[in-house]
């Protein structure tokens, strides 16, 4: 049976999610404007316009393909007594916290898989073709990846029997920290070290967007920083320093990949068969 809070969240979920999303992206964008970590190498307007446009395309496609929300899935699992937490008696707060943590572990494992499995990497690499990293990069995911990710999250919520409030909190937190840790933000070394002990910081995640393969294959976490340390995928700092590191992928240096059409065709593009000028970046 749903609690009063879960019922209220379910009734107001779309408005709550949109309001929190707009608040977070606005705050991060403003801080980026006045306290940037790195100078932009590409047109910020071009990147934001295309990354936001892609986010709208993804939202429409997902609503048409999979018109099921995680909270509604959690309600269904609860009513059917399906999943781990529907068969284990735990205090409500503990159950919610554990569900959010375990769902975050699922997202970490998914991210690793998208890098290690060649077919999935072809889909995910579009996220890495951005030549700068800021909050808008947190919206830059291919529709196929978004659909696969949503399917995985739905499966995880069902398997765990996650409470509806946990499913809601997980999505809101994940969306918020994704905008935050992609942000072009300057926290300062002391604050970064404190926050990084629990949450993935912008500096920690920026290493993951390095063009250096060893660094690209590190720091997979989106929310909790524990998983990278636990599974040996943590890199503390880029070899060339935060200001000297190159963002993006070596084979996608042309600025055309910042455009929404080229983003969508990235999985079908074989860079090895195409002539390229090393280091070429279009104006």
Image (spheres, rainbow, N blue to C red):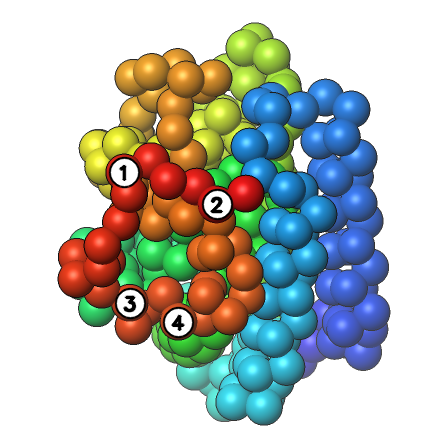
Q: Nearer the viewer, residue 112 or 210?
A: 210
Residue at 60% x, 31% y is 40
**In which quadrant of the rendered image does the C terminus lie?**
top right
Which class describes the residues within 10 Å of circle 1: few (<14), some (14-19), or many (20+)? Answer: few
Looking at the image, residue 46 lies above or below residue 42: below
Q: Residue at x 28, y 43 (%)?
A: 277
Is residue 112 shown left or right of residue 191?
Answer: left
Q: How crowded is mark 3: few (under 14 residues within 10 Å), some or many (20 or more)?
A: few
Q: Quadrant of residue 237?
A: top left
**To which quarter of the image does residue 233 belong?**
top left
Among the two numbered marks 1 and 3 on one chain, the one whose residue lies closer to the N terminus: 3
Q: Which of 61 and 96 is in front in this view?
A: 61
Disc 2 crowd, CA 10 A, few/some/many (<14, 14-19, 20+): few
For image coordinates 43% across by 82% down, the residue present is: 82
Classify mark 4: residues with Cα within 10 Å, few (<14), some (14-19) or many (20+).
few
Task: Name the secondary structure under disc 4.
Answer: helix
In space, the residues marked 3 and 4 are separated at their CA atoms by 7 Å
Q: Is residue 98 left or right of residue 18?
A: left
Which residue does the numbered mark 3 point to in the structure image? 269
The answer to whether residue 101 of the structure is visible from this angle is no
Q: Position of residue 56 (x, y in %)?
A: 66, 71
Q: To which residue does mark 4 refer? A: 265
Q: Position of residue 32 (x, y in %)?
A: 71, 31
Element assignment for label 1: loop
Instruction: Report the residue marked by disc 2.
Output: 282
Q: Name the residue under label 1.
A: 278
Q: Is residue 266 left or right of residue 100?
A: left
Towards the viewer: 65 or 247: 247
User: Which of the two labelled residues, at mark 2 and mark 4, occupies the earlier sequence position?
Assistant: 4
Q: Can residue 49 be seen in this view?
A: yes
């Amino acid at each position: 049976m749903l609690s009063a809070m879960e019922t209220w969240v379910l009734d107001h979920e779309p408005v709550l999610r949109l309001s929190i999303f707009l608040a977070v992206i606005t705050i991060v964008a403003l801080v980026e404007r006045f306290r940037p970590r790195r100078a932009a190498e590409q047109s910020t307007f071009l990147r934001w316009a295309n990354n936001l446009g892609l986010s709208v395309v993804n939202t429409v496609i997902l609503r048409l393909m999979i018109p099921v929300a995680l909270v509604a899935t959690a309600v269904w699992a609860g009513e059917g007594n399906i999943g781990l937490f529907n068969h284990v008696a735990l205090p409500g707060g503990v159950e919610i916290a554990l569900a959010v943590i375990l769902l975050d572990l699922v997202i970490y494992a998914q991210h690793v898989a998208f890098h290690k499995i060649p077919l999935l990497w072809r889909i995910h690499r579009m996220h890495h073709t951005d030549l700068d990293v800021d909050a808008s990069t947190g919206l830059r995911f291919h529709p196929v990846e978004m659909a696969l990710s949503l399917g995985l999250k739905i499966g995880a919520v069902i398997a765990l029997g996650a409470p509806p409030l946990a499913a809601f909190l997980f999505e809101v937190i994940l969306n918020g920290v994704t905008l935050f840790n992609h942000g072009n933000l300057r926290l300062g070394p002391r604050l970064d070290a404190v926050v990084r002990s629990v949450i993935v910081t912008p500096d920690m995640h920026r290493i993951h967007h390095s063009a250096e393969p060893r660094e690209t294959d590190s720091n997979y976490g989106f929310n909790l920083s524990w998983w990278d340390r636990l599974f040996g995928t943590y890199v503390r700092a880029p070899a060339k320093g935060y200001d000297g590191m190159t963002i993006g992928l070596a084979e996608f240096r042309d600025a055309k990949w910042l455009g929404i059409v080229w983003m969508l065709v990235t999985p079908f593009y074989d860079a090895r068969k195409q002539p390229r000028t090393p280091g070429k970046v279009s104006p």
